[in-house]
């Protein structure tokens, strides 16, 4: 069946498809969805041939299909008002109507409770995971809708504790929306979203969350080759931080200094990042946002700093290949984009060093990893890799 073939082509289990569809529907509608792996199984067995409209739209998004027909989904009775196919001239209106149905307006809350905040943070966690595995292009619009909903809740009556939790949820969502916008190449859209997140983060008062926002905003400035602005953002972070966050902050500072070719500062901050991460004992017991700062992630950040430094100075640091290789070989699905970025950069360095055979292997692997990741940053890394291969 076309549906099952599309799922297997992406290497997804029925449960993973169900989780992603459920995340989309819940993020859009603001309420829980019963969609599960059993529902996916019934589709594949032909027991369900025409899921509800919001499920069809989410399934097409998750499985990369343009229409339900591409997944083999057909209505038993097709009515004039709901055609399977539409002409290109009518497609925009049909999609607008479908989107309106998929994203109904949530009723305003008169009283906000902690359970409402927990629901927001649970949906945010799902979207953050999806961003890491599938890229910002897949997540950005859903994160933006969730952010709009959360900001709208500031008008509700609530206690000081719940309001503080809401500010933290808004800061985290703004970070995700800004980051996914940046990852999708929407730099102008990302800037005000980062500013919103930093404002909410300061009002919330959590130094760790502020660190997460500032370092992600700094990464965009590094991508845009504005090291002074990146260091200014990193300098806004103070106070007590989890060890993983300190390591990340040091690695980002090293990247900013690398753009300017400052070898001494790069070395200093990378040593600090390494020492800080040595103190990490259990990521799972820390704040949710720190759990993605794995050893592979820090290795990728360190390798990227040395990668930038090599470009600035014209000399390869002996550590750059080792750090990028460690990140490229990380065996975790949660680090899909990290692995793809590190693999592309590793191939680039090896091409520049004349190690063509090994570089070709990593380049092929980078393309395989990138196949299901919608990321403008990754596309840029692949383009740089191609140019290095042609030299």
Image (spheres, rainbow, N blue to C red):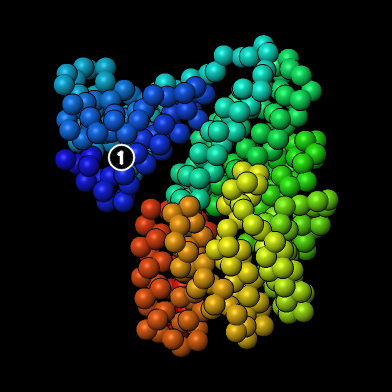
| Placement of the N terminus among the 4 image quadrants | top left
Q: Give the answer, above or below, for where 337 lies relative to 350.
A: above
Q: Position of residue 224 (x, y in %)?
A: 65, 61
Q: Quadrant of residue 229?
A: bottom right
Residue located farthest toward the bottom when viewing the structure as drawn: 354
**Depth check: 224 or 338 in front?**
338
Q: Position of residue 91 (x, y in %)?
A: 34, 31
The answer to whether 187 is drawn above or below residue 24 in the figure is below
* Residue 213 x %, y %: 70, 48
The residue at the far right in this view is 239
Tell me the quarter of the picture where residue 318 sits. bottom right
Can residue 103 be seen here? The reply is no
Picture quarter with the C terminus:
bottom left
Which sits in the foreground, 371 or 37?
37
Relative side of 374 to 80, left or right: right
Residue 226, above or below 152? below
Q: Residue at x 19, y 41 (%)?
A: 2
* Residue at 40% in and 81% down: 358
Q: Which residue is mark 1?
A: 14
């Amino acid at each position: 069946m076309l549906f099952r073939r599309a799922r297997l082509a992406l290497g997804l289990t029925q449960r993973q498809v169900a989780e992603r569809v459920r995340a989309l529907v819940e993020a859009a509608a603001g309420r829980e969805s019963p969609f599960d792996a059993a529902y996916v199984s019934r589709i594949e067995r032909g027991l369900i041939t025409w899921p509800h409209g919001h499920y069809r739209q989410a399934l097409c998004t998750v499985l990369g299909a343009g229409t339900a027909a591409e997944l083999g989904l057909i209505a038993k009775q097709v009515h004039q008002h709901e055609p399977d196919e539409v002409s290109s001239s009518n497609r925009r209106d049909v999609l607008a109507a479908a989107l309106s149905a998929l994203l109904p307006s949530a009723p305003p809350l008169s009283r906000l409770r902690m359970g409402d905040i927990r629901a927001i943070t649970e949906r945010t966690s799902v979207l953050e995971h999806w961003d890491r595995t599938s890229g910002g292009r897949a997540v950005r619009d859903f994160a933006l809708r969730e952010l709009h909903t959360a900001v709208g809740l500031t008008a509700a009556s609530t206690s000081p504790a719940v309001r503080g939790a809401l500010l933290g949820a808004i800061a985290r969502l703004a970070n995700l929306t800004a980051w996914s916008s940046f990852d999708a190449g929407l730099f102008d859209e990302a800037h005000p979203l980062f500013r919103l997140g930093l404002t909410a983060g300061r009002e919330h008062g959590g130094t760790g969350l502020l660190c997460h926002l500032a370092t992600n905003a700094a990464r965009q400035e590094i991508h845009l080759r504005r090291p002074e602005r990146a260091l200014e953002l990193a300098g806004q972070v103070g106070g007590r931080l989890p060890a993983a966050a300190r390591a990340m902050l040091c690695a980002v500072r090293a990247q900013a200094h690398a753009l300017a070719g400052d070898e001494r500062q790069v070395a200093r901050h990378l040593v600090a990042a390494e020492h800080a991460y040595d103190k990490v004992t259990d990521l799972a017991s820390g704040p949710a946002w720190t759990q993605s700062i794995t050893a592979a992630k820090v290795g990728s950040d360190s390798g990227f700093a040395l990668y930038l430094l090599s470009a600035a100075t014209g000399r390869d640091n002996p550590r750059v290949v080792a750090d990028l290789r460690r990140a490229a070989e990380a065996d975790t699905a949660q680090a899909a984009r990290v692995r793809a970025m590190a693999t592309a950069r590793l191939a680039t360095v090896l091409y520049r060093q004349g190690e063509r055979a090994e570089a070709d292997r990593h380049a092929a692997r980078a393309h395989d990893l990138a196949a299901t990741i919608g990321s403008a940053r990754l596309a840029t890394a692949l383009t740089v890799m191609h140019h290095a291969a042609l030299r």
